[in-house]
């Protein structure tokens, strides 16, 4: 393939893996490097969860599935690029929700919401629409298996649970959240289990995905690892 064709060839990069693996940070860096659009699909499941909490479809941590399905038609998720973050902020029915969707309350309820078939159908359709022109880096749990099974490059990210809990703890503490490391570790482990054992679209490595364990890798090392694989795919 000629150099001109190589640089203009746009692909879909699917990044799946456990929670708090640094998938979004990695995906965002890749998108900036390649001039691609970055889509954080976890933020979309969090947005529906936030709306369900606000509307009373989740009470005392119990998700009322019928009530969530009933309000799905009213929840409007949009993205708007924020140059300060170098990524898009998520809006729920016009309200900026970027911070609220990361709260421990939303984190504790999101597995229950993301296991509802109708929720997944709506969000998967939106994600496929957003990536229809290729040139996207999408991170989630089912991107390489369900959303874009034909993605040209699939990465399955893993990292030690304690390392992941420490990263998320530092992030939340920096924002002033009152949380403990044990609480975060428990949330990380229970979400891993929920993500891997749910009936619909469970988290699993696609057969053609390459695995990246980033427990002890710097962002620069991860980027070098990625660029090697990217060059291979783009030169095929
Ligand atoms: O990536 P995250 O931790 O922000 O994702 C939040 C939750 O959403 C996670 O517990 C699993 C769910 N999720 C999903 O089921 N499918 C996706 N494609 C992305 C996230």
Image: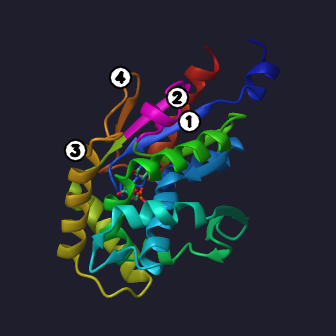
Q: Residues within 10 Å of mark 2 (few under 14, many from 20)?
A: many
Magenta residues, start to end: 142-156
Q: What element does badge 3 sit on?
A: helix
Q: Mark 3 points at which residue?
A: 197
Bin the neighbour count of mark 1 within 10 Å (Cα to Cα): few under 14, some 14-19, many 20 and up: many
Report if the CB atoms under discs 2 and 3 are less than 8 Å apart. no
Q: In the picture, which quadrant includes the N terminus?
A: top right
Q: Quadrant of the C terminus?
A: top right
Foreground label between 4 and 2: 4
In this picture the colour scheme is rainbow
Q: Which residue was labeled with disc 2?
A: 153
Query: Could you say whether the residue bearing mark 1 is in a helix, strand or loop?
Result: strand
Up the image or down, 98 lies above or below 140; here it is below
- Assess mark 3: CB under 8 A from ligand 1? no
Ligand 1 - quadrant of the structure image: bottom left
Q: Position of residue 5 (x, y in %)?
A: 79, 20
Measure the alpha-carbon separation of dots 4 and 3: 18 Å
Earlier along the polypeptide chain: callout 2 or callout 3?
A: 2
Distance from Cα at disc 3 to Cα at disc 1: 25 Å
* Residue 101 visible from this viewpoint: no
Q: Closer to us: mark 2 or mark 3?
A: 3
Whole-percent x and y of residue 203?
32, 41
Quadrant of the image occupied by residue 164: bottom left
Q: How far apart are marks 2 and 3 (CA)?
A: 25 Å
As drawn, the label of residue 13 is 1
Tag 4 residue: 207
Q: What element carries label 4?
A: loop
What residue sits 59% from the left and 25% below the top?
231
């Amino acid at each position: 393939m000629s150099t001109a064709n190589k640089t203009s060839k746009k692909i879909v990069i699917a990044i799946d893996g456990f929670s708090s693996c640094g998938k979004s940070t990695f995906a965002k860096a890749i998108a900036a490097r390649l001039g691609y659009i970055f889509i954080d699909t976890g933020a979309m499941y969090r947005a529906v969860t936030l709306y369900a909490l606000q509307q009373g479809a989740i009470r005392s941590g119990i998700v009322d599935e019928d009530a969530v399905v009933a309000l799905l038609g009213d929840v409007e998720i949009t993205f708007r690029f924020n140059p300060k973050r170098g990524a898009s902020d998520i809006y729920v029915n016009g309200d900026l929700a970027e911070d609220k969707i990361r709260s421990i309350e939303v984190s504790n309820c999101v597995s229950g919401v993301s296991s509802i078939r109708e929720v997944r159908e709506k969000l998967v359709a939106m994600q496929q629409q957003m990536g229809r022109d290729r040139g996207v880096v999408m991170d989630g749990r089912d991107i390489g298996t369900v959303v874009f099974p034909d993605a040209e490059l699939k990465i399955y990210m893993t990292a030690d649970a304690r390392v992941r809990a420490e990263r998320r703890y530092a992030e939340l503490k920096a924002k002033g959240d009152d949380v403990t490391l044990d609480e975060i570790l428990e949330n990380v482990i229970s979400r891993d289990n929920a993500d891997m054992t749910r009936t619909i679209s469970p988290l699993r490595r696609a057969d053609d995905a390459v695995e990246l364990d980033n427990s002890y890798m710097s962002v620069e090392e991860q980027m070098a690892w990625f660029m090697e694989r990217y060059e291979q795919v783009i030169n095929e």
